[in-house]
Amino acid sequence: MHPHVLVYWALSLPCVAGRVLSTSNTNGSSDVVNVNWLEGKPALNLGTTFGLPWPKGKHAGDRVAFSAATVDGEVVTLQSWVTSYWADGSIKWTGHAVPGSESVPDGYKVTVAKGTARKIKKRTIKVEDAEDEIAVDTGKVKVSFPKSGNVLVSSLSTSSGKVVGKNGKLVLQSQSGVADTGDSSVNKDINYYQLESKINTTTVDEDSSVRTLVTIRGDHRVTGASAATHDPWIPFTVRFYLYAESDTIKVIHTLLFDGAADKDFITGIGIRFDIPLAGEELYDRHIRIAGVDGGFLNEAVQGITGLRRDPGAAVRTAQFEGKKTPDVSTWATTVSSRLQWIPAWNDYTLTQLSPDGFTLKKRTKAGQGWVKIPGGTRAPGLAYLGGATTGGLAVGLRNFWKRYPTSIDISNAATDAGQITLWLYSPAGEPMDLRQFHDGLGEDTYAKQLDALEITYEDYEGGYNTPHGIGRTNEIYIRPFDSTPSSDDLAAFTEFIDEPPVLVPEPEYIQQTGAIGTYWDLPNSTTTTQATQTIETHLYFLNKFYQGQIEQRKWYGFWDHGDFMHTYDTDRHTWRYDIGGYAWDNSELSPDLFFWNYFLRTGRADVYRFAEAHVRHTSEVDIYHLGPYSGFGTRHGVQHWGDSAKQIRVSTPIYRQIFYFVHS
Ligand SMILES: *[C@@H]1O[C@H](CO)[C@@H](O)[C@H](O)[C@H]1NC(C)=O
Ligand SMILES: *[C@@H]1O[C@H](CO)[C@@H](O)[C@H](O)[C@H]1NC(C)=O
Ligand SMILES: *[C@@H]1O[C@H](CO)[C@@H](O)[C@H](O)[C@H]1NC(C)=O
């Protein structure tokens, strides 16, 4: 395997399993590499993957064995694979997975030893690859992944055997046209489509000792509920990562847009799970929706606080804390005799239509009016639905507010089968409009197009402004609970989703291996001069400046998150967001390399997170992954896919390689 083959248009940066290496104890020469938490020790250790570079010629072929221990010396099982080789055949980059653990170590030490490996046969994840489904048991969660049909996750249960998630599937809705703003009349010419995932293949990686990767590919098909028919479309790849000793499933959801901008308007992209609630009293069913600063909407389907009559403090406290309430026979009869008059809240919705505000509402059932709940600013995108005894499911979307319009629905909570739908694109937002922003301006000859380039700097040619083939990846986390978790536990999990813990080697080590070239050095090298210090000051400024501009200019949204603008308009004092060839940057001047190299040199977490969002955007949205331009990127412009210059300089894998190998 050659590195450039591995990262070629690595849209969702999957962990491409190379040669599988054994975990072992050996004698012989060995060295030790430290890996540390990017942001310091996290609150939760739910399993992590990381990458390590190795010097040329040091570890030949596969006659090496990797092992790991915490910095305190406790041995942990390690899964290892090669992601890249040097030209001489020695190992250049490896990927490694460590399991989850109750106590979070300060960091890990990876030891590599030469010699023939003595295999430790310690399989901690159970994987059953049957004809019709793949079943995975991490010791903390059991999940079944069907190989056909529309359901990606047929059953999800806790280690004690409670089924807390069923019928996990993708949902999509779209329409064939949009009404102009202000035109509220029903347009009879518009068709509306309801679609669901349809599996083509479900596969599991060969080595599943510490981390199992189940990959499901397919597309979306219309369902019986659809008013009109539509060809199968929006191909997806959904990767489920499960770690030994971890109950949390990381889901990397990638879709490709293969529609036509003028007749395919997406109005919702979601993932939906059923949550069995049969047998749980309505007052023991709990809703949790994450708000800002670790706070939660904290309610029961049938609330027994704040009523005219008091059921007793023990009952109120239990319900508020998400614990089973004392037997109803012990309640004040002034309440227990009147439960039938207390409404049950069946449906909840949180909607984030801008990066700065979300709204919340609930209703007792379809056909009744919604009741507004006080809203807030930036929702982290996590919800839990479950019961004190039946358990439940938490589902969260990373970058929720940054990827607006997003929303979360909790539905049918008063029935036997509740539901959580996480909307990566909210049905409450406007239809996704990917049409070109101008009508061609009469540029129907090459001479006119060239002349237009002189003034707006846009490289325009009819037919080239197409979103057909661009992609987007979202990161989702699913976690089962045996009983309703405490708000503190859910807050820790919300923090985990916001910045999933990352393990990285030290900058000195990466530099010494030469695996990302020898052209760079650490900021405090022996060659520091006044001139290099000036450059360091500029680099520091530029990184902070672009991070600040994203927030100041609100460069957020489903397709936009991660990119920034190309050129500034000093008269209007705004970036040239509306000027042909200037607006979105689309990797112009290779900022991908700049930011990732700056991370390598500094090891700074803010730089990593900024560069991560950026590389995801540029590798997904600015590049075609199917269709006639597949493999090409698009030059900078007002729309990420708008300019007619389709270029390899934008899609070049070298922009993505550092993230690919480090993140692994
Ligand atoms: C390492 O070498 C020692 C001494 O030769 C031997 O007793 C031991 O079994 C070896 N360990 C492994 C893991 O091969
Ligand atoms: C479904 O999977 C098969 C086998 O991998 C592949 O050949 C085929 O192209 C896929 N079909 C679609 C529609 O993706
Ligand atoms: C360089 O070293 C000095 C002194 O040890 C330290 O204060 C400074 O933060 C270092 N700079 C960088 C960029 O690491």
Image: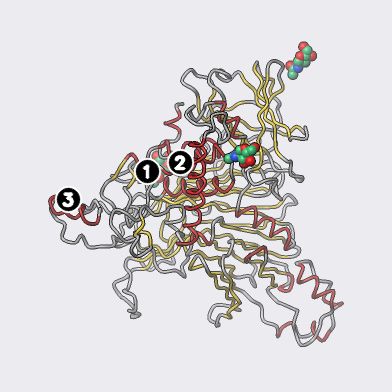
Q: Residue furthest front?
A: 530
> Is residue 386 shown to the viewer in this render?
yes
Give the mark nearest the N terminus, 2 or 1.
1
Quarter-wise, where is residue 81 in the image?
top right
What is the distance, in whole Å, between disc 2 and disc 1 at their CAs?
Answer: 9 Å
- Answer with the quadrant where ligand 2 appears in the image: top left
The x and y percentages for residue 86 are 49, 22
Give the mark nearest the N terminus, 2 or 3.
3
Q: Which residue is mark 3?
A: 450
Residue 96's place in the image compared with 65, above or below, is: below
The x and y percentages for residue 466 are 29, 54
What is the distance, in whole Å, between disc 2 and disc 3 at their CAs?
Answer: 31 Å
Q: Which residue is mark 2?
A: 594
Q: Amino acid at mark 2?
A: Phe
Name the residue at 60% across, 77% down.
373
Name the residue at 19% across, 55% down.
452
The x and y percentages for residue 567 are 35, 54
